[in-house]
Image (cartoon, grey):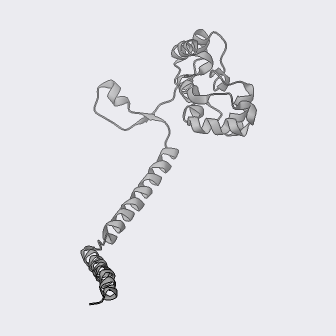
Amino acid sequence: MESGNINMMCWLIPLLVGVICGILGYLLGKSNTKVIDNSDELKRCNDDNSRLRAQLEACNQQLITMPETKDVSSSLGATPMAAVPILIPFEAAAAKAAIGKTVKENDLKVVEGIGPKIEGLFHAEGIKTWKDLSETSVARCQEVLKGGGDRYKIHDPASWPMQAKMCYEGKWTELAKWQDEHDHGKL
């Protein structure tokens, strides 16, 4: 045999073996791949999701229309009964005794860190009572402050809902103690 043919065979044989191995590897890999059909499970999850969203919406609507309630049976040691609406009366004398100044009902300025201008921002957003503020998230409070402009950036509303809840529930001594312990209402 000539040296040219031998040289060509040295290249041709490994090339053919490589191509054959590549084709066989591809075919073997493709044959082992199984397609899993999860369409039934996906449909079931979507149905569950839709059902849960409807339940959540119904609960939210019920919560909006329901007055604040408290189960008084548990505090009385009785068997559970229907929830009874509870009204928390404002006691100006108790507030004045604890805070040391005259307090008007639903005056947001009682909350450490809220002044007349910030109170005006909250009123403009429909947050006019201690109860409203106590149910407002800190993120929403931040949005209200941002709506007032850059000069309100320095205020930290992290404790405002908690302080408002103390006001709403008539926990004046606790509020006064908390405000004394914290610098300008900061947590």
Check the picture and name the quadrant holding the N terminus.
bottom left
Q: Is residue 113 left or right of residue 57?
A: right
- Which residue shows up at 59% across the image and 15% down it? 95
Q: Position of residue 101 (x, y in %)?
A: 66, 11
Q: Position of residue 100 (x, y in %)?
A: 63, 9
Can residue 164 be seen here? The reply is no
Q: Is residue 8 left or right of residue 172?
A: left
Please tell me in which quadrant of the rendered image residue 96 appears: top right
Q: Position of residue 94 (x, y in %)?
A: 57, 13
| Circle count | 0
- In the image, 76 versus 136, the foreground residue is 136
Check the picture and name the quadrant holding the C terminus.
top right
- In the image, 131 versus 27, the foreground residue is 27
Q: Note whether 162 is above or below 62 in the view shown.
A: above
- In the image, 101 versus 89, the foreground residue is 101
Residue found farthest to the bottom: 1
Q: Note whether 65 is above or below 116 in the view shown.
A: below
- Which residue shows up at 62% across the image and 22% down it? 111
Q: Note whether 89 is above or below 7 in the view shown.
A: above
Q: Position of residue 43 (x, y in %)?
A: 36, 68
Please tell me in which quadrant of the rendered image residue 19 appears: bottom left
Q: Is residue 108 left or right of residue 34?
A: right
- In the image, 97 versus 93, the foreground residue is 97
Please tell me in which quadrant of the rendered image residue 90 appears: top right
